[in-house]
Structures are given as structure tokens and as C-alpha cells.
Image: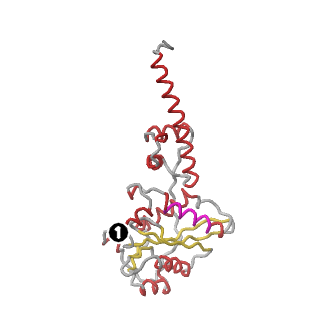
Amino acid sequence: MTFGYSRQAYYKHKQLEEFRTKRDQNVLAEVRNIRHKQPKVGVRKLHIMLNNLEQSELKISRDQLFALLARNDMLVKQKQKFTRTSRPDKKASVFPNLLDMKTIDKKNQAWVVDITYLNTCYGFAYLYLITDRYSRKIISFVVANRLHAKYACKALQKAISTVDDPAGIIHHSDHGSQYCSEEYQKILNSNKILCSMTGIAHCYDNAVAERINGILKQEFGLGRTLQSVKVAQELASDAIYIYNNNRLHSALMYKTPCEVHDAL
């Protein structure tokens, strides 16, 4: 007998403790590796990502993972903040919200479009984004130092170049002056893209686009003050690549945007 246990039970208990210690070390190492690219990924997605690796030394229940991260001060806190970058063009035509009238169940059926600001040491930079509404894949982006229709047009042309025939795609945005400009509307019309807009002052009608803005800032470091517009461009490019290819979405049954987009 050893400390009230049979020798067999004692060694079995000791082996289990050694296994758990080694497993926890392996899990923490893999979590640090994942968070090197996705610093704000939480417990639920980490658990799925670890299970997807199919390595026995990383198998851990979600509750055990939560407790392990808590003991090592590795839980993350999510912050949500909404900030407007565009202002409604009161002189522009009013377009209906076509997303309210249609079920989106495949890629390139609807694009959601938005602009978000990035802080730099020299003032604001602006990130122009176009995202597939169904797959959540960011299909086009431009970083510029000004809010101007020409940069929105550049992002739109890049998005159009990713499809064989853009006719019939719903383009959903707010009533920002960039999207209401004659130049921008001309590109939409010439490609037979359907213009859809949120209600004026109803920013949450474009919730998917706003959510992605928040993800890029909160989870990928674009919310901090960046050194320059050039640095903002480089970080945005890296962040969007990781977002598209590595970040799991609960709305996509815990798949990545590229997995969903490329499967269709």
C-alpha cells in the first residue's frame, strides 16, 4: 500500500497525472501557436480547432480547456464598438433594402460593402471592404488615406474581377456618399449589379459588414494605432488572409470563409 492506495492504483493515478500534465503543456503550446495568428480566438473555436488537428495528445473537453486557460490567465475578453465612417448623401437616390426581400443561400448572390477607419500615427487611414454575404469571405479590399469615391470604385472593380459574370449580384451598403456617387453607380449599372442600401440612419441593416469590421480590429490588431498607411496596408492584407483562410465562423458551422466559398 502507498498512501492508502494499492500499488497498482497509485501508479495508475500517477500515470494519469503525468498524462494530463503533458497534455496540458501540449495544448497550451498549440493555443499559443494558434493565437500567434489569431490573438483573440476564444475557447469554443479553440476547442474545435484542436479537435480538427486529430492529435491524441491535444484531445481535451471544452470545460477542461476553459479551466486550463483560466488557470494560465489566457482567457480573452471581447469588446464591441460601433463607429461610423460614412455619412449619408441626402441628395442621392434612395435604393431599397433588397436583402430584406431575398434569401441568400449561395456565394456571389450578395456582397455587403462598408468602410472602416484605421488609426495611424499620421491620422486616419480607411479600409474599403467588400464581403460575400453568404460565405463571409472578404473578396476585395483597399486601404487609402482618404475617404473618396475613387477608392470605393477601386475596391468594387477588384471584386468584379473575381467573378465571370457579376450581373444580378446584390450590392448592399449604407447611403454613404462614396456609394451614391455618379462614378460608383455607373460601375454598378454597367455591370448590371443590383444596388441595395440600408435605411438612412439604420446602420444595423448592414450587420454582417459591421461585424467583420469589428473582427478585424478586435481579433487581428487593426484597432490599435498603426505606424503609417503603408503599415496599415500590410497588416490589413495579412489579417484578411488569415480571416479568410483560418478563422472559424459559428454562422458557417465552424468552417472558414474560404472553405465555404470554395465548396460552392
Q: Quadrant of the C terminus?
A: bottom left
Q: Position of residue 67 (x, y in %)?
A: 49, 37
* Magenta stretch bounds: 233-244
- Residue type, label 1: Lys
Residue at screen point 45% across, 56% down: 248
Q: Observer-nearest residue: 144 or 119?
A: 144
Residue at screen point 57% across, 43% down: 29
Number of callouts? 1
Badge 1 marks a residue whose secondary structure is loop
Picture layout, residue 257 above or below residue 191: above
Picture layout, residue 205 above or below residue 39: below
Reading the image, the residue beneath label 1 is: 106
Q: Is 218 positioned to the left or the right of 94 in the image? A: right
Q: Position of residue 184 (x, y in %)?
A: 48, 83
Q: Position of residue 14 (x, y in %)?
A: 51, 24
Quadrant for residue 6, please give it: top left
Q: Main secondary structure of the magenta part?
A: helix
Quadrant for residue 168, please give it: bottom left
Residue at screen point 47% across, 81% down: 180
